[in-house]
Amino acid sequence: MTIMIIGLLIFLGSHSVRIFAEDWRQRQIAQRGETTWKVAYSAVSIVGLAIAIYGFGQMRLDPIYIWYPPMGMRHAVALLMVPAFIMLAAAYVPGNAIKAKLGHPMMLAVKIWAFAHLLANGRLGDIIFFAAFLIWAILAFKTAKKRNRLTPSAPVSTSKMATIAAVLVGLIAYVVFAFYLHTALIGVPVFS
């Protein structure tokens, strides 16, 4: 579990710079350039995520159970992941009304994903893993909304087609992940 926690600290720590050290981040970008910052940030993030995922897999080999969730919680997760995937898609489809309305749909998707998985997993490692992401997403969303209030941006033009595309991409991604990739990548079937 220690490996997973180290990975989480690296990954979520790098993603928390805008929460806790925005001035420092801006100075680094000004001194080193935006491209250098993005490359370094990406490298640290990838390393942290890889370590966290490896540690998560290792933790599953010798689990410590805190509680045993009822089977119905799996169905709740499956249901909650539908809007999470739609919000994740909305973060990337330009000009959709979901992103225009919510502002930061990816962080909301992470919140839903983490909360849903906390409902259905009772191992200590799972609780630490998903709670860490949930806490990060709450803090990151709050900070991003505050940043938006301080420096509001111009209204974004939206279209029905972009919104429909975001929903369809999210639904297709959900089906592919739930029925095929979750078992292959995570080792746990969504529907069993």
Image (tube, rainbow, N blue to C red):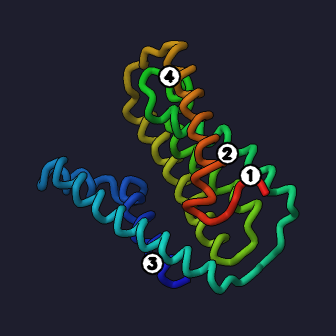
Q: Nearer the viewer, mark 3 or mark 1?
A: 1
Q: How many neighbours does mark 3 have within 10 angstroms: few (below 14), some (14-19), or many (20 or more)?
A: some
The part of the image, by quadrant, that contains residue 68 is bottom right
State the SS at label 2.
helix
Q: How many neighbours does mark 2 have within 10 angstroms: few (below 14), some (14-19), or many (20 or more)?
A: many
Are circles 3 and 1 on residues that touch, CB within 8 Å? no
Are circles 2 and 1 on residues that touch, CB within 8 Å? yes
For the residues marked 1 and 4, what is the alpha-carbon distance in whole angstroms?
25 Å
For the residues marked 4 and 3, what is the alpha-carbon distance in whole angstroms?
37 Å
Residue 141 locus on image (x, y percent): 52, 46
Q: Nearer the viewer, mark 2 or mark 4?
A: 2
Amino acid type for the residue under numbered disc 3: Ile
| Image mark for residue 77 | 1
Q: If you read the primary sequence from the N terminus, does the residue marked by circle 4 or circle 3 appear first?
A: 3
Q: Would residue 93 be visible to someone looking at this image?
A: yes
For the residues marked 3 and 2, what is the alpha-carbon distance in whole angstroms?
27 Å
Residue positioned 49% across, 51% down in the render: 140
Would residue 97 appear left or right of 25 to someone viewing this image?
Answer: right
Residue at image mark 4: 96
> Is 153 rendered above or below residue 119?
above
Residue at image mark 2: 81
Residue 118 locus on image (x, y percent): 71, 62
Residue 134 locus on image (x, y percent): 60, 58
Residue positioned 37% across, 53% down in the render: 18
Are circles 1 and 4 on residues that touch, CB within 8 Å? no
Residue 69 locus on image (x, y percent): 83, 67
Please name whichever residue, 48 or 14, is drawn nearer the observer in this view of the structure.
48
Amino acid type for the residue under numbered disc 1: Val
